Amino acid sequence: MKKAVCALAVAGVAAAAVLGTVFSGGKGFWFAVAAAALLCCVPFFLSFEKRAPSAAELVLVAVMTAFSAAGRFIFAPLPFFKPVSAIVIIAGRHFGMQAGFMTGALSAVISNIWFGQGPWTPFQMLCWGIIGAAAGLLGKLLCKPAALCIAGVAAGVVYSLVMDVWTVLSVNGTFSGGMWLTAVLSALPVTGVYCVSNVLFLLVLDKPLGRRLERIKTKYGVFPANDGKELQ
């Protein structure tokens, strides 16, 4: 099953690249990459479905997604200062890789109903999904405030680096390493805001929210042990 999922994802990426190029007269590289980013999420969604999560697990993922999206709405007046990455990290840390990825990817889709859907949405899905999955993989290593701070900074940097790929594609129509580096350097102040907001929200939310999530896990026996084997 795992090999079939990977093969499907690779085939989908290839098809997206071909179709994007054909239908746009060779100028649809941005579409192909956006489709590829979306298709990279497929193995996580299918592996989550394969595990047949319980209703309680689905509800918790939905609640964390709603919490994340609501946080993005509430802090909309403050550009780039959002709690999404922090909440996704907390979800991944306590619920595991699959739930972390699902929370991150769905947060992008749900919140963009308000902020606007577009070719950038798959990049946001992939960014926040990877952040959640990484938090799930690290698990208990993120129990210390210093580790959370490092995770918050890393999440801000990763999000900025990946989203700057979309910035170059949207401006240039194709990818250029030089333009990407320029975009990364010019976005350093924004990346700094990402990092600071992630750290602050993690330090404020982790203990109160984490205690409740662990209590729910224990009470209802939901989510497998965070052993890094969820995608197998």
Image (cartoon, helix red, strand yellow):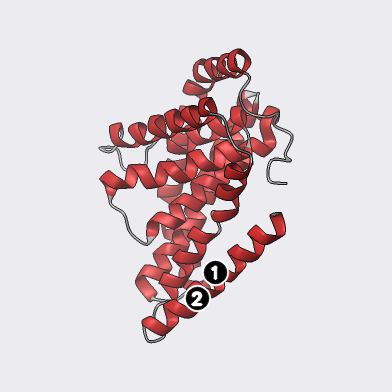
Label 2, residues with CA under 10 Å away: few <14, some 14-19, many ≥20: many
User: Which quadrant of the view contains residue 220?
Assistant: top right
User: Which quadrant of the view contains residue 6?
Assistant: bottom right
Given residues 141 and 21, the one toward you in this image is: 21
- SS class of the residue under badge 2? helix
Residue occupied by mark 2? 17
Q: Is residue 198 above or below residue 50?
A: above
Q: Which amino acid does label 1 sit on?
A: Val
Residue 160's x, y, as percent? 47, 52
- Badges 1 and 2: C-beta atoms under 8 Å apart? yes
Residue at 56 percent of width and 29 percent of height: 54
Residue 99's x, y, as percent? 56, 36
Given residues 25 and 8, the one toward you in this image is: 8
Residue at 48 percent of width and 68 percent of height: 33
Q: Is residue 78 above or below residue 5?
A: above
Residue 118 showing in the rendered view: yes
Q: Residue 193 carries which label?
A: none
- SS class of the residue under badge 1? helix
Residue occupied by mark 1? 13
Q: What residue type is labelled 2?
A: Ala
Label 1, residues with CA under 10 Å away: few <14, some 14-19, many ≥20: many
Seen from this angle, which residue lies furthest bottom? Answer: 25
Q: Dividing the image into 4 quarters, which one contains the N terminus?
A: bottom right
Q: How many marks?
A: 2
Residue 114's x, y, as percent? 26, 44
